[in-house]
Image (tube, rainbow, N blue to C red):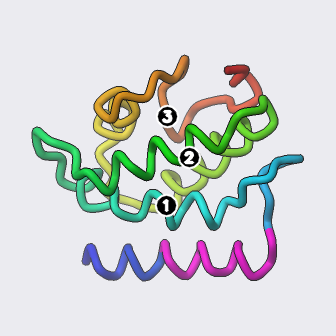
Amino acid sequence: MASSMFVKLTFLAMACLVLGTPLVNGAVYCGQIQLTIAPCLGYLRNPSPAVPAPCCNGVRSINNQAKTIPDRQGACRCLKATATNLPGLNLPALAALPAKCGVNLPYKVSPSIDCNTVKN
């Protein structure tokens, strides 16, 4: 089942890359974000005490790439859409993931977040 979710995420990411779906007015593409966080899927479906290093590396990479408000809002929209389309994710683990990876976000990632309010 996890591999089918990975295939679904990979297909979605590749489609975004091929279609060139940028984050609103941003330089970071949703497909890139999805590929970057793909190592987090196993953890987000079955959390363990430690987050895998490739997952945290991806979370930090996205945070470092999304510097402007439009980029951050776009990253938020991408993560929200991805979380909404991948059933079986542990939502508390998703919300806690940035902090567990040492990334300080002023909001919690969730399918219900209003990404228009993301400013930092």
Quadrant of res 99 = top left
In the visual, does 67 lie left or right of 39?
A: right
Q: How many marks?
A: 3
- Which residue lies under the disc numbered 3? 109
Residue 10: mark in rendering? none
Does 85 sit above or below residue 20?
A: above
Of the residues shown, which amino acid type is indicated by label 1? Thr
Which is more toward the observer, 45 or 57?
Answer: 57
Q: Is residue 30 left or right of residue 33?
A: right
Q: Is residue 45 magenta?
A: no
Question: Height in image: 96 above or below 20?
Answer: above
Q: Position of residue 57 (x, y in %)?
A: 39, 49
Q: Amino acid at mark 3?
A: Val
Which residue position is annotated with label 1? 36
Residue at the spot of label 2: 62
Q: Would you say residue 18 sits in the magenta stretch? A: yes
Q: Secondary structure at mark 2?
A: helix
Magenta region: 9-20
Q: What amino acid is at disc 2? A: Ile
Disc 1 secondary structure class? helix
Q: Earlier in the sequence, mark 2 or mark 3?
A: 2
- Tell me the residue at 35%/45% (across/down): 56
